[in-house]
Image (tube, rainbow, N blue to C red):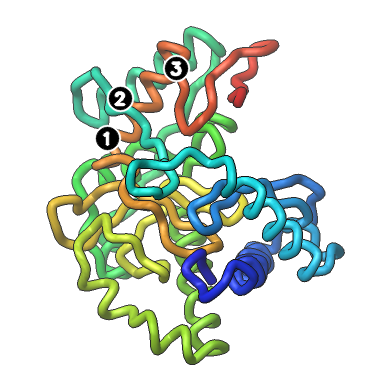
């Protein structure tokens, strides 16, 4: 299911199986578009993953070929590990409301539209009870304030209001339950209770009940990690190949501050730069 399989071949085939299982649960239409993924610490472009008509073994072979080629040229650290750049922290202080206001003002002035719409009245306490979670304060603010987002507002992801967050969370949890049932050896190696007990920000091979999605696209989800620890409330990524790469941002507030910085200053965020074409926001890589 992840890049930590016994071999590159096993990891590639598991990636295809898991990603397509996720897309089936989402009832996504077939697409010829390529997607970006990570395998053995290497970022690869995957062709055919979103099109079930392409045999799974052909997609896996393409992943192996791409990973083998990229691994030879990927930048490495002094320890020999692939470098994974993190978004720079924002230089603009302020709470989440301040960051959302910056984004809203930018969209209204540059695109003549709202970046997001107001949330309808929702009982967030009831959602937390249903999920058996305690949300960080800024996540509660986010879900209580935002009911929908402008398309393409964040590079590579669709930002999620609480209703869509619950759908994506349910999809990942159902997929994980299905994987553990079909592959007992996986369930034996990666115990959900053990992973849930680890500190927030620790990479997990399972999508855990403590993870709250805030953005998603094509089998990769940004989530808030509500496990205990110094990084509780941080934002990490989980994808079809399994474990994330650690915290991208220490909080939802920091994530939206980075987005506001990128929009206002035209700086790179998640490998892309915001550009306006014909009154439309696009992200160029």
- Labels 1 & 2 near each other (Cβ < 8 A): yes
Q: Which mark is residue 99?
A: 2
For the point 19% across and 24% down, the residue is 94
Q: Disc number at residue 281?
A: none
Above or below, comparing residue 52 to residue 231 in the picture:
below
Coordinates of residue 167 in the picture (x, y in percent): 50, 61
Pointer 3: what residue? 267
Of callouts 3 and 2, the N-terminal one = 2
Residue at x 53% of width, y 67% of height: 171
Visible residue check, residue 25: no
Q: Judge whether residue 261 can be spotted in this image.
A: yes
Query: Which residue is identified by label 1?
Result: 253
Q: Distance between the Cα atoms at labels 3 and 2?
A: 16 Å
Give the Cα distance between marks 1 and 3.
18 Å
> Which dot, 1 or 3, sits closer to the camera?
3
Which comes sooner in the sequence, label 1 or label 2? 2
């Amino acid at each position: 299911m992840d890049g930590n399989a016994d071999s590159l071949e096993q990891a590639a085939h598991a990636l295809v199986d898991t990603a397509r299982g996720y897309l089936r649960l989402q009832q996504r239409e077939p697409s010829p578009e390529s997607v970006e993924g990570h395998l053995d610490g290497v970022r690869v472009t995957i062709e055919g993953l979103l099109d079930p008509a392409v045999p799974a073994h052909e997609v896996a072979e393409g992943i192996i070929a791409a990973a083998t080629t990229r691994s030879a040229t990927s930048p490495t650290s002094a320890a020999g590990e692939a470098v994974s750049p993190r978004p720079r922290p924002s230089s603009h202080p302020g709470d989440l409301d301040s960051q959302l206001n910056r984004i809203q003002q930018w969209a209204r002035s540059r695109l003549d539209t709202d970046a997001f719409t107001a949330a309808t009245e929702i009982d967030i306490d009831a959602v937390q009870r249903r999920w058996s979670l305690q949300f960080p304060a800024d996540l509660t603010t986010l879900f209580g304030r935002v009911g929908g987002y402008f398309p393409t507002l964040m590079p590579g992801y669709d930002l999620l209001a609480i209703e869509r967050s619950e759908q994506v969370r349910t999809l990942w949890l159902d997929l994980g339950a299905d994987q553990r049932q079909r592959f007992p050896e996986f369930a034996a190696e990666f115990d959900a209770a053990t992973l849930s007990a680890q500190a927030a920000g620790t990479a997990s091979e399972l999508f855990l009940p403590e993870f709250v999605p805030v953005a998603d696209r094509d089998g990769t989800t940004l989530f808030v990690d509500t496990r205990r620890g110094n990084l509780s409330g941080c934002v990490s990524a989980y994808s079809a190949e399994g474990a994330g790469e650690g915290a991208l941002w220490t909080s939802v507030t920091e994530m939206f501050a980075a987005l506001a910085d990128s929009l206002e200053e035209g700086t790179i965020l998640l490998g892309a730069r915001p550009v306006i074409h014909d009154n439309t926001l696009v992200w160029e890589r």
